[in-house]
Image (tube, rainbow, N blue to C red):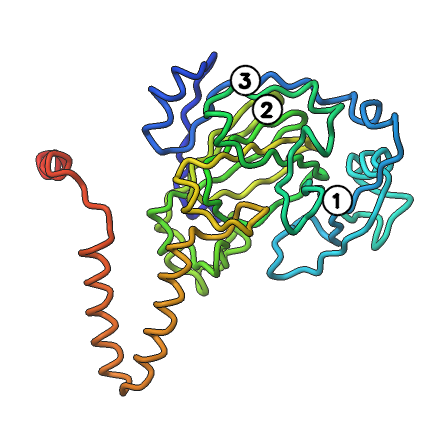
């Protein structure tokens, strides 16, 4: 079911720091800034072959890593065995079934405190991976190494930091939705309840068709800029290796200091959401018709105080072209 218009992500080539900061970053839309210098491909097993290394990887019985509706298994494999299995379509050696899928999301040395850093967890591979410095060094938060089986699809979610997704090997489809379409994505926390974005259940999620769908295919060497709060869903069209580089673009005190993954809502947002839950509990004391009325008043108040408003010139331009 093709229920949404597909909007193309603009593509740029030969982007340097000045071009990125001048022409791409201020637009706050997903952009593909062009090629990243990345040579981490056929040398994977060789690069880490100098020392025994075992990885904790996620295994699922199908190729939809959606969290809401599957059981994820965490298993340990030597690096070379993991690469071999992840690249296979069918497995002679497996944990669950011959068509199981594999996914690696690198973690820090202390998974509860330290963000992932390719330079620390995979130093040999990091020598062959270079990302353009579109941000100041002190803004760096993490570099997450990812490897996935062909056909593996991750759930739709948002991150609170700007990030660059570098596709090193394999092809990957990325679908994005604007933060302004959050009302149509049926959110639970930072994730969309709409699991299958290609053939959604429109009886359960009728508003989903209102969300504008941006889509692009990343080829090896491509780098995609994903602004903070933009929802994204990835599908590995082939066995794929990639790296996400996240950086802090807000003041440091904005972020939760106990968040090694970089996916917790900003401290102020968490407090506001907690206050909202308390407020909704108070509304439960009212009869349904009163609760509905005052809830609508609250929505209007939120719209007037917190929603971004179009500049008057933009509003007038829209009226002139209507």
As measured in the structure, the alpha-carbon distance from the residue carrying label 2 to the one carrying label 3 is 9 Å
Q: Position of residue 94 (x, y in %)?
A: 87, 48
**Callout 2: few (<14), some (14-19), or many (20+) C-alpha neighbours within 10 Å?**
some
- Figure quadrant of residue 71: bottom right
Mark closest to the chain's N terminus, 2 or 3: 3
**Is 40 above or below relative to 235?**
above
Mark 2 vs mark 3, foreground winner is: 3
Residue identified by numbered label 1: 102
Q: Is residue 102 left or right of residue 285?
A: right
Numbered mark located on residue 219 in the image: 2
| Residue located at (58% from left, 46% from top) | 261
In the foreground, 114 or 193: 114
Which type of secondary structure does the marked residue at label 3 adopt?
Answer: strand
Mark closest to the chain's N terminus, 1 or 2: 1
User: Hey, which residue is sitting farthest top in the picture?
Assistant: 14
- Figure quadrant of residue 149: top right
In the foreground, 76 or 142: 142
Split into 4 quadrants, where in the image is the C terminus?
top left
As measured in the structure, the alpha-carbon distance from the residue carrying label 1 to the one carrying label 2 is 21 Å
Mark 1 vs mark 2, foreground winner is: 1
Asked whether the residues under the numbered discs 3 and 1 touch, taking CB atoms below 8 Å apart as contact, a structural biologist would say no
| Residue located at (42% from left, 44% from top) | 229
Residue identified by numbered label 3: 35
Asked whether the residues under the numbered discs 2 and 3 touch, taking CB atoms below 8 Å apart as contact, a structural biologist would say no
Q: Position of residue 49 (x, y in %)?
A: 87, 27
**Is 290 above or below relative to 5?**
below
**Callout 3: few (<14), some (14-19), or many (20+) C-alpha neighbours within 10 Å?**
many
Which type of secondary structure does the marked residue at label 1 adopt?
Answer: strand
Q: Position of residue 5 (x, y in %)?
A: 39, 40
| Residue located at (31% from left, 86% from top) | 285
**Is 52 above or below relative to 309?**
above
Q: Position of residue 197 (x, y in %)?
A: 51, 49
């Amino acid at each position: 079911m093709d229920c949404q218009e597909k909007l193309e992500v603009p593509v740029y080539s030969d982007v340097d720091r000045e071009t990125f900061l001048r022409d791409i970053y201020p637009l706050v839309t997903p952009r593909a800034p062009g090629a990243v210098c990345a040579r981490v491909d056929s040398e994977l097993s060789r690069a880490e072959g100098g020392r025994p290394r075992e990885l904790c990887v996620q295994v699922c019985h199908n190729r939809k890593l959606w969290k809401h509706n599957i059981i994820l298994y965490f298993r340990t494999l030597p690096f070379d065995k993991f690469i071999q299995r992840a690249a296979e379509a069918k497995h002679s050696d497996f944990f669950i079934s011959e068509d199981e899928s594999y996914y690696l999301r690198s973690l820090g040395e202390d998974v509860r405190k330290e963000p992932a850093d390719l330079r620390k967890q995979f130093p040999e591979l990091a020598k062959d991976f270079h990302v353009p410095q579109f941000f100041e060094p002190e803004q760096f938060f993490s570099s997450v190494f990812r490897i996935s089986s062909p056909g593996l699809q991750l759930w739709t979610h948002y991150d609170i930091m700007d990030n660059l997704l570098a596709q090193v090997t394999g092809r990957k489809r990325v679908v994005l939705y604007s933060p302004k379409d959050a009302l149509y994505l049926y959110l639970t926390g930072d994730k969309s309840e709409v699991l299958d974005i290609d053939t959604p259940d429109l009886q359960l999620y009728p508003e989903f068709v209102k969300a504008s769908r941006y889509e692009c295919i990343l080829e090896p060497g491509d780098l995609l800029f994903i602004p903070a709060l933009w929802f994204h869903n990835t599908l590995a069209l082939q066995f794929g290796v990639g790296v996400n580089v996240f950086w802090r673009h807000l003041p440091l005190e904005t972020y939760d200091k106990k968040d090694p993954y970089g996916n917790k809502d900003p401290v102020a947002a968490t407090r506001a959401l907690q206050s909202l839950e308390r407020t909704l509990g108070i509304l439960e004391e009212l009869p349904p018709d009163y609760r509905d009325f005052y809830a609508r008043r609250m929505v209007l108040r939120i719209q007037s105080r917190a929603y971004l408003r179009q500049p008057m010139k933009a509003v007038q331009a829209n009226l002139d072209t209507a």
